[in-house]
Image: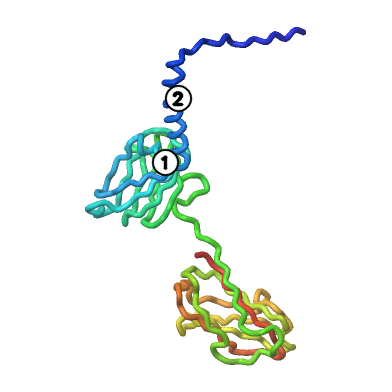
Amino acid sequence: MTIEKKIPQAVPVAQGQVTDGIPAINNRNDRIESAAFGFVDVTIDGTSVNLTSDQFWEGSHLRIGVGSPAPGGPVTLNVPAEQRGLFTVLNQCGQTVTIRISGQAATPPTIANGDMGCFQSDGTNVRTAAGASGSAPPMPFQYPVAVSDETTELTAGTAKVRFRWPTGFTLSSVRASLNEASDSGGTVTVDVNQNGVSIFSTRLTIDALEKTSTTATVPAVLSTTAMTDDAEVSVDIDDAGAGAAGLKLVFLGVA
């Protein structure tokens, strides 16, 4: 078997063509880099704005801001009918923004004020990118608190520890644990107050001979899930059990 290599004949290029081509190549490289990483500010002073092709490709991140006058209602952002990979929109205009190609058949996505969404365009419709919700995803929040030392036997009482939330968040559950379990017949019961008001309708408990509230016969029930930034929190021990020690809490939610 014979394999023949064929090399295309090189075509001479004039020096002027090389020189003229360098700026064009640089411009295209700049355009690609900007489209991938650039941030474009779009000022909104009405309820509808048309994004030019140059703006659409100038950056992959669109920051929607307030113009003068500020928009008086929900805003429609019309983007060019061009295929475009992932791009993000940060909405800071004070109104809900709908992102669409004019006349698109699919229901266009919307993004609330203060949210950031990830989108893509097939040249006919703008859609929320797969795996993106159109708003910033919530971040898991875990906040551990030691209510006592590890060895001293617990005693009942109010405000065994006080602290303040470092941020606002949505509470999903509270777990309690012990270093030393309560003796037979003694249940540890805990209450948590936000600004003096209990967050439970059914108190948090740890059964006798157990070290965790996850095995409680009667699960705790939250009466509120809205935890407020800088709110004062106090922990009460309603029932100390018998011989229990080393009480700790973990607050779980999303911020």
Q: Is residue 167 left or right of residue 95?
A: right
Pointer 1: what residue?
59
Q: Is residue 168 left or right of residue 179?
A: left
Q: Residue at x 65, y 86 (%)?
A: 188
**In the drawing, what numbered circle is on residue 119?**
none
Question: Measured along the vertical axis of the image, is residue 60 above or below residue 181?
Answer: above
Between the C-alphas of marks 1 and 2, the distance is 22 Å
Q: What element carries label 1?
A: loop
| Residue 93, x across and y down, in percent | 32, 54
Q: Residue at x 46, y 47 (%)?
A: 118
Q: What residue type is labelled 2?
A: Ile
Pointer 2: what residue?
22
Q: What element carries label 2?
A: helix
Who is closer to the viewer here, 115 or 130? Answer: 115
Q: Residue at x 44, y 22 (%)?
A: 21
Tell me the colour scheme of the image. Answer: rainbow
Mark 1 in CB contact with mark 2 (< 8 angstroms):
no
| Residue 109, x across and y down, in percent | 40, 47
Is disc 1 surrounded by few (<14), some (14 to 19) or many (20+) residues within 10 Å? many
| Residue 146, x across and y down, in percent | 62, 80
